[in-house]
Amino acid sequence: MTKIKICGFTNADVARAAALAGADAIGLTFYNPSPRNVSIDVARWIVAALPPFVNRVGLFVNANPSQIDEILAEVSLDTLQFHGDETPADCEQYQMPFIKAVRVTTETNLQQVAADFSAASALLLDAYNPAAYGGTGESFDWSLAKVDIDLPIILAGGLVEANVAEAIAQVNPYAVDTSSGVESTKGVKDIDKIRRFISKVRP
């Protein structure tokens, strides 16, 4: 069964409702330029609201290690997601499960990325946009995600209720990830859209 990660929550009640609706992982964004950025206090509030057995993911983009250490000391996270230009050593230093995001183009060698980041729990494949590190609502050529690697693939990038079933049929990923695809406005999650998205992943 395809796992579901929904990223970029800013409201505890909506995050809890999403988890109860079937989301396996809830993502929190710690990246100031993002409209989904959360403070430590808000992140703690969201994490405290979640039911058990939901993976709590912290998303970082080229973050200073001291910032990550400060957040880890205050917020109970299960998994780190690195969405910038981090090296394998950058990702591994926290000795926690981590996801490495890859902005895919026709030039991307996913076999090499998987080899370089072999300690990762999964690779998250997202659309490439030179102006942003994710959350753009843009998709990419899913055929590029059909690769034979040892790491689980989390498919992201422009997934919405209208296309997620087709994306799963084409790629058969371990999990799908959406953020802007289930929002009413940028940074504001819509629980009805979330429920419809989940129903398309698990009809």
Image (cartoon, rainbow, N blue to C red):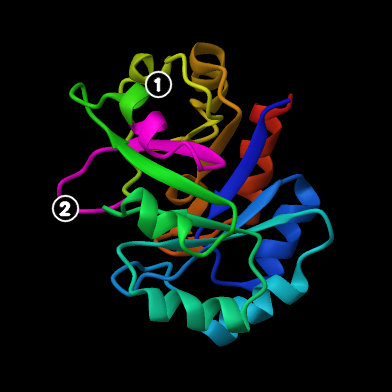
Label 2: which residue? Answer: 131
- Rendering coords of residue 42 (x, y %): 58, 81
Label 2 – label 1 distance at C-alpha = 22 Å
Residue type pointed to by label 2: Ala
Give the side of residue 19 with respect to residue 73, left or right: right
Label 1: which residue? Answer: 145
Write the start and end of the magenta stretch as one range. Answer: 113-135
The residue tagged with tag 2: helix, strand or loop?
A: loop
Residue displayed at 65% across by 55% down? 191
Give the side of residue 107 with respect to residue 39, left or right: left
Q: Is residue 73 magenta?
A: no
Residue displayed at 60% across by 33% down? 175
Looking at the picture, does residue 43 appear above or below residue 142?
below
- Rendering coords of residue 64 (x, y %): 33, 74
Residue displayed at 59% across by 52% down? 97
* Residue 39 visible at all: no
Q: Compare residues 11 and 114 and report the one nearer the observer.
A: 114
**Sequence-first disc among 2 and 1:** 2
Give the side of residue 192 with respect to residue 126, left or right: right
Mark closer to the observer (2, 1):
1
- Tell me the quarter of the image containing the N terminus: top right
- Rendering coords of residue 137 (x, y %): 35, 43
- Tell me the quarter of the image containing the C terminus: top right
Looking at the picture, does residue 29 appear above or below residue 85?
below
